[in-house]
Amino acid sequence: MASQITITKLISMKQKGEKIVALTAYDYPFAKIVDECGVHLILVGDSVGNVVQGEANTLPVTMDQMIYHTRMVTRAAGSALVVGDMPFMSYQVSIKNAIKNAGRFLKEAAAAAIKLEGGTAVIETIKAISSVGIPVQAHIGLTPQSVHQMGGYKVQRDEDRLMTDALEVEAAGAFSVVLEGIPSVIAQKITKALSIPTIGIGAGPDCDGQILVLHDLLGLNDRHLPKFVKQYARLIDAAKAGISEYVDEVQTGKFPAEEHCY
């Protein structure tokens, strides 16, 4: 078994110029596969709303649902560092509420850290959660929980604001920051300016690491894919072929055959 990935290990990887590999996962079987393939960080993302629950966005996802999915993932992860994603309204109401919900990820779901969206607006929240011993991964740029405020899923190009957000989340105590939907040249500047790792998704090749949604990478659905996604497999085709063959064999009496009977 590979050695356990820790936050200090991720920071060391940045210092050495070693790329960090991250993926989302939402259940035990896929988390086990992801972990065994050598992924360093597994994010149990609120993207579960889109790719598992069939929602139009991440906003309906609840804390209880996130704890449920995160616990499945931590049971499977042998070496990868597991991060639980704070869902919409789990940290915006009050700092007290944010600390309580962040703690649930560690206490009930055995995650190693939490992630929350936002830059300067959540600085005090990051400080407060970090101060009680809960590691925080920040997330700036295109933040899906703010989809209505942003007017849709749009690339974020305000370099001054993005740099300020990045520097402030680092100063607040974040151990890493996800950069989403940011032009490569800006992401490169942010990565050079920070001492904590940057994890890119639609932010170019110069981030310290990369993350994708597992279901997009594996081709597990037919939803529209953003430009930044590379599809490494088309499992939906294999699944449909296998299920269609099963349907046919049951209807024609080919299954179960003699070898499947006691």
Image (tube, rainbow, N blue to C red):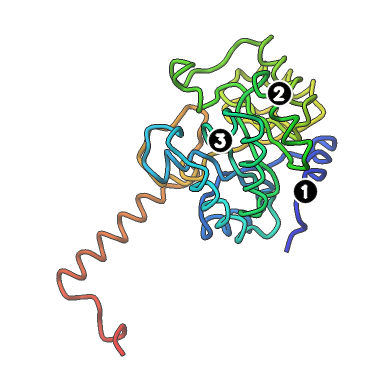
Q: In whole angstroms, how far apart are the C-alphas of marks 1 and 3? A: 25 Å
Q: Given contact means CB atoms under 8 Å apart, are the residues at marks 1 and 3 in contact? A: no
Q: Which-is-in-front pick, marks 1 and 3?
A: 3
Q: Residue at x 84, y 35 (%)?
A: 15
The mark that comes first in sequence, 2 or 3, is 3
Q: Report the quarter where the C terminus lies.
A: bottom left
- Residue that mark 3 sits on: 90
Q: Which residue is mark 2?
A: 123
Badge 1 or badge 3: first in the primary sequence: 1
**Badge 3: how crowded within 10 Å, few (<14), some, or many (20+)?**
many
The alpha-carbon separation of the residues under discs 2 and 1 comes to: 23 Å
Residue 117 appears left or right of 69? right
Question: Which element type, helix, strand or loop, lies under badge 2?
Answer: helix
Q: Which residue is mark 1?
A: 6
The answer to whether any part of residue 88 appears in the image is yes
**Which kind of residue does numbered mark 2 sit on?**
Ile
Residue 201 in the image, given as x and y percentages of width and height? 59, 31
Observer-nearest of 151 and 191:
151
Residue 243 coordinates in the image, percent (x, y): 29, 60
